[in-house]
Amino acid sequence: MCCLRSLHFCMLRKFQWYTYILLVATETRRRIACMRAPRPKIPQLPEPESEPEPSATMDEMPPPEFWE
């Protein structure tokens, strides 16, 4: 009976380690994905407020006759 308990405890320990490793792996994956993707998006968040800038670039473009 005692042996079974210790075996069960050992299994629990291994399971805890497995879940911990899995959690760390998923967390690192998420962090890597966050480091890759949203960083370029963060500077773009204030852009909708400054709308006159894109219109200025549109005004600077040459007229359609220039392209023909």
Image (cartoon, rainbow, N blue to C red):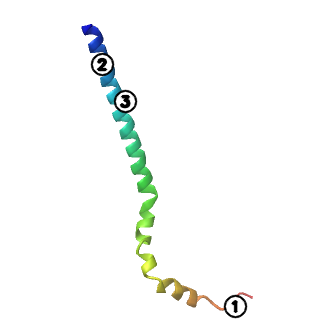
Indicate the position of residue 31 as horizontal and vertical percent values: 39, 50
Residue at x 41% of width, y 55% of height? 35
The quadrant in which the C terminus is found is bottom right
Residue ID for mark 2: 10
Q: Provide the secondary structure element on which disc 3 rests.
A: helix
Tell me the distance, in whole angstroms, between the alpha carbons under discs 1 and 3: 66 Å
The answer to whether 35 is drawn above or below residue 18 in the figure is: below
Compared across the picture, whether 68 is left or right of 46 comes to: right
Q: Provide the secondary structure element on which disc 1 rests.
A: helix
Residues 68 and 50: in front is: 50
Tell me the distance, in whole angstroms, between the alpha carbons under discs 3 and 2: 12 Å
Which picture quadrant has residue 20?
top left
Query: How packed is label 1: few (under 14 Cα within 10 Å), some, or many (20 or more)?
Result: few
Query: How packed is label 2: few (under 14 Cα within 10 Å), some, or many (20 or more)?
Result: few
Query: How packed is label 3: few (under 14 Cα within 10 Å), some, or many (20 or more)?
Result: few
Residue at x 24% of width, y 9% of height? 2
Residue at x 47% of width, y 86% of height? 52
Residue ID for mark 1: 66
Which of discs 1 and 3 lies nearer the camera? The answer is 3
Residue ID for mark 3: 18
The answer to whether 64 is drawn above or below residue 30 in the figure is: below
